Every structure is written in C-alpha cells, then in structure tokens.
Image (cartoon, rainbow, N blue to C red):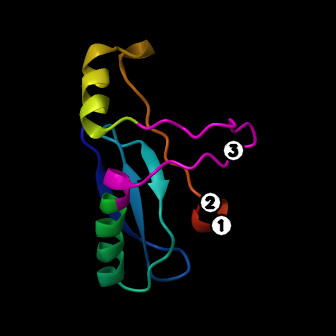
Amino acid sequence: MSGYFELVDAPDGGYRIRMLDGTGALMAISITFPTKKAAVAGIAKAREIAGTGLVRDRSHDQQSTPVKQQSPKQHVKAARKSTPVGGRGQLIATGRRAGMGH
C-alpha cells in the first residue's frame, strides 16, 4: 500500500504538506511553509527522514531501553510474514506537538 503527499493551503497563508496512506487516511501534517518551493523541499526532507531517521520515544510511558528499529530489509521480511489483526497494518506518525499542525 503506497501513500502520498498533498500540498494544501495553510489557513493562515502559505502551504502545508499532508501525508496520507494508500487509503487516503491522514498520517501527518506539516508546519506552514511560506512558498510552494519550500513545501516541495519539505517533502524531500520528510522522505529522507522517513527512510533513515531514528525513533525517539518521548512518550510518558517510555521504556528505559531505546526503541529497537528494524533495518528496512528486516521490516519488509517481517511485514510479509505476519498479518496484522484486520488484515492491515497501521503506521502512526508522531512528532513534537509544537511542530505538528492541526
């Protein structure tokens, strides 16, 4: 299931990026960018971070040990071997609240 990005007008001027999964469900929304060119550069940066970024658990119930992250090859193998409840997996995008728009 492939997702996609949408470039949308921000309510206070400028542009925002929405990341949606293959079914069209909203996964994340960006900060406001002043221009379309800046928003497109933000998409490129989001792709880079999604492919290589580490996970930092800043939740209230965080564990004392770091979150283990699978390599992309391990992740693909694990996804092919298991079938989540309901037949679909969920990806939840999180970020610092100050950086996430509503």
Magenta stretch: give its range: 49-69
Q: Which residue is mark 2?
A: 96
* Whether label 1 touches label 2, CB < 8 Å: yes
Looking at the picture, how far across and down is residue 53, in whole percent?
41, 55
* Amino acid type at mark 2: Arg
Q: CA distance from mark 1 to mark 3?
A: 15 Å
Instruction: Answer whether residue 57 is magenta in the image.
Output: yes
* Amino acid type at mark 3: Ser
Q: Secondary structure at mark 2?
A: loop
Instruction: Identify whether 73 is placed above or below 44.
Output: above
The part of the image, by quadrant, that contains residue 74 is top left
Q: Secondary structure at mark 1?
A: helix
Q: Which residue is mark 3?
A: 59
The part of the image, by quadrant, that contains residue 17 is bottom left
Circle on res. 56: none
Measuring 45% from the left and 47% from the top, which residue is drawn there? Answer: 27
Looking at the picture, how far across and down is residue 102, in whole percent?
59, 60
Circle on res. 98: 1
